[in-house]
Amino acid sequence: MQVSRLEHRFKELKENGKKGLIPYITGGDPCPDRTVELMHALVSSGADIIELGVPFSDPIADGPVIQKASERALAKGICLKNCLDWVEGFRKNDDLTPVIMMGYYNPIERFGLNNFSQRALEVGLDGVLIVDCPPEELRDFSTKLSKKKIDTIYLIAPTTPERRIEQIVQGCSGYIYYVSLKGVTGANHLDLSEVTSRLKLIRKYSKLPIAVGFGISSKENVKNVANTIADGVIVGSALIKIMEKAEAERKCPIGEASLFMKGLSEAINEI
């Protein structure tokens, strides 16, 4: 049986005693024409997996930084089709780095579940994370993706009861996304002791890799989370903020993003 890119990447990281660094970017922000270039630059700077966000008009799980990124991308006409096309463009020069599409259910439903699963297979997408639908509502869609060898990733929050954790992980594949805090993306009240306790609880019910996101914005955050039993660390709002600032200061957003990613990569590799 062929091993998926995600499974291979996490296995490779574990064998080398490393933790995965996973940047999140909003598709089309800051510059649609350079999205594929940005993805390659992040990989060159240390990213192990890329989460590509689909812009949406009502991103209820996202804080103000990613909300604004979505607004900027939508104002440029960016949609789900563009994001799939960028994955296809990325695959022309990188067939190893896993790419996850993260977003909300409405754009996929409008695109058509069958159309999406087929196009996702064609472009080389590795996984889908839909933040506003419970696993029960995605069962049929998850089955369609599974038949195309595409993983369905689910969120587990600090408030998720133990019984619910057991149910969620049964339908999850690829990795589990643990939300490190109560709030939206970009919040900054990270409690490492609680994160560690919750990861141990999740481990009781699944052997899947666990990546931790929300509220991780600095080298120190990355190093501290990577020092837990997490398998990966996700950074989103901080990266987007770096590029937003670069645009405002007439600097190169991709260059600044690369420098930031290199710093995080160095921090995670110090463990």
Image (spheres, rainbow, N blue to C red):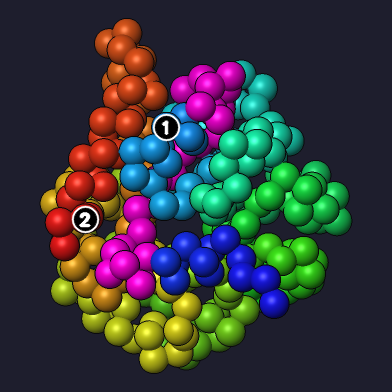
Quadrant where the N terminus sits is bottom right
Is residue 14 found left or right of 109 in the rendered image? left
The mark tally for this picture is 2
Element under label 2? helix
The residue at which mark 1 appears reads as: 41
> Is residue 106 toward the left or the right of residue 219 in the image?
right
Q: Is 176 one of the magenta-colored residues?
A: no
Q: Give the distance between the C-alpha atoms of the residues marked 1 and 2, in whole angstroms.
A: 18 Å
- Is disc 1 in contact with disc 2, using a CB cutoff of under 8 Å? no
Instruction: Say few, some or many: other residues with alpha carbon within 10 Å of mark 1 (under 14 / 14 to 19 / 20 or more).
Output: some
Which residue shows up at 34% across the image and 45% down it? 46
Q: Which x, y percent locates residue 135?
A: 63, 73
Residue at (26, 39) in percent of width and height:
262
Q: Amino acid at mark 1?
A: Ala
Figure check: 244 above or below 170: above
In the image, residue 22 above or below residue 28 = below
Check disc 2 and give the amino acid type: Asn
Q: Quadrant of the C terminus?
A: bottom left
Label annotation for residue 269: 2
Q: Residue 257 appears at what percent x and percent y?
A: 33, 30
Is residue 30 inside the magenta stretch?
yes
Residue 260 visible from this viewpoint: yes
Query: Which secondary structure, mark 1?
Result: helix
State whether residue 60 appears in this view.
Answer: no
Question: In the image, which residues are magenta?
Answer: 13-37
Q: Is residue 204 above or below residue 227?
A: below
Q: Going 65% across and 51% down the picture, which residue do you hit?
A: 125
Labels 1 and 2: the sequence-earlier one: 1
| In this view, 197 is above or below 146 | below
